[in-house]
Structure formats: C-alpha cells, structure tokens
Amino acid sequence: MSAAARLDGVEACVFDAYGTLFDVHSAVGRHRARIGEAADAVSAAWRAKQLQYTWLRSLMGRWTDFAEVTADALDFALDEARIADGALRRDLLDAYRSLECYPEVAGVLDALRGGGMRTAILSNGSREMLDAAVASAGLASRLDAVLSVDDVGVYKPHPDVYRLACDRLGVRREAVCFLSSNAWDAAGAAAFGFRVVWVNRFGQARERLPGAPEVEVDTLGPLPGLVPG
C-alpha cells in the first residue's frame, strides 16, 4: 500500500469519526491531572472496552446506543483503576462529546469539497454524540451527511452499517472512498466493497482479516491528492 496511489472513480469520501477525525484520548487528556499516573491506562482501557462492547453486543443481539456503551466502558476502566469519583466520571463523559479534532481535518475537508467531492461521516456514534462532536469541532458545514449506526441497530463491521452510506448518499459501494484509523474498520469496509484508505496514525500492525485497504497513510493530509477533484 502506498500514499502515491490514485483512487479513480470516487464520488464520495466517507470518514469514520472516532480515532479518524476525533482524538478519542483527548477526553482523558483534558482531565489528566485529576486522574494522575493512571491516566494513560484509563484512556486505553476505556477505548478497548468501548470497541469490545460494540462487537459483543452485536453478536449477542443486545443493542444499545454508543452513549451507553461509552459509559459502560468508562465504568469498567475506572473500576479497573480503582477510581471512584462521580464528578470525574461525569466530566469525562461530557468531554467525549467535544473531543479534539486532529489538526489536518478541517483543511482536508475544505480541499475535498472545494474540488467537488462529497463528504460524510459514518460512525458507531449515537446521533446525539456525533452532532455534539461535529458542532464542537466546527465541521457541520464541511459535511454532506453525518450517518449513525442508530439507524440500523448494529455496529461496525456489520455490512448493514457500510450499506447505510450507499443508501443515504445514493452512490455505488465502489464509488465510496472510506477512511478509518481503525484497522478492523478498514478491513470491514474493504470486505464490503469500499475503496479504503487506512489512516494508520500510530504505526499499528496490519489486521489478519478479510478485506484490505488499498492505501495506507499516517494522517488524512494526503487524501486530496489521492482522489480526483
């Protein structure tokens, strides 16, 4: 995979939200002094359990929205760190609604839209969480759609989630460039039939799953040069 590749025939760029556009560790970062030396462990456990609970609930057929999954995962992480602080818990959950955006995001979206490309978010996030994050980051005017798994009642990487983008945007799957920093999400989207760019921000190893991204980059910065304007 190479950042030099060109993805011809793309009509829409669809982005995962958490970890791709928004820094999921910025919530704990905002309250690092209150958590102390356990901050990094709490943040890592919170994110790991958040993802695990989406997969397990999908397999169990026990849907609940991402806000509740996020709260449950935080409760696990705080309990594991032996932290019992209701005010901190509330503040961390509030911080998750206004996560920091990665620095290149706004400029990349502006460049794509300036070249006539349609842009959207497709996320596990609940509609309310996504609306809050998008508003906080000032991205609303830079997106044609914000799509939540709330509308299908199952989490990524279920194919129904990726199909939602095709249905709502009215584009064929092979005309969608999907971008995610989550290797499992990139694999799921590629298996569905999207053209996938894996935003490997942290130099992670490739997943051994069906579906492989066509392009690997370390930030979203190269994207406008990968898709036709």
Image (tube, rainbow, N blue to C red):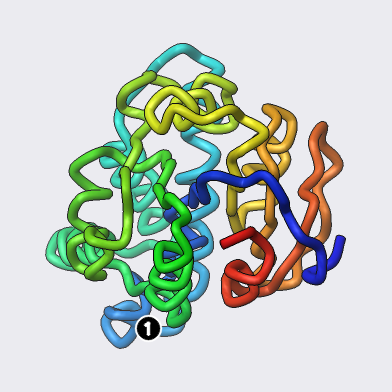
Work out which quarter of the rendered image holds the C terminus and state it.
Answer: bottom right
Q: Residue furthest bottom?
A: 33
Quick check: can you spot residue 42? Answer: no
- Identity of the residue furthest to the top in this view: 61
- Residue 179: percent from left, percent from top: 59, 53
Q: Which residue is the extreme one toward the left?
A: 87
Residue at the image position 18 percent from the left and 62 percent from the top: 135
**In the image, what residue type sits under mark 1?**
Gly
Image-quadrant location for residue 35 = bottom left
Q: How many marks?
A: 1
Give the camera-side residue of 37 and 14. 14
Residue placed under numbered mark 1 in the picture: 36
Picture coordinates of residue 63 (x, y %)?
37, 20
> In the rendered view of the protein, which quadrant contains the N terminus?
bottom right
**Residue at the spot 54% in from the left edge and 39% down from the top edge:** 52
Label 1, residues with CA under 10 Å away: few <14, some 14-19, many ≥20: few
| Location of residue 163 in the rendering, given as x and y in whole percent from the top left corner | 52, 23
Res. 196 in view: yes
Up/down of 32 relative to 97, above or below = below
Q: Position of residue 34 (x, y in %)?
A: 26, 81
Position of 48 relative to 87 (above/below):
above
Q: Is residue 41 left or right of residue 214?
A: left
**Depth order, front residue of 84/225:** 225
Residue 25 occupies quadrant: bottom left
Q: Is residue 188 above or below residue 84?
A: above
Q: Secondary structure at mark 1?
A: helix
Identify the residue shown where x is 24% and y is 39%.
127
Residue at position x 43%, y 41% from top?
A: 122
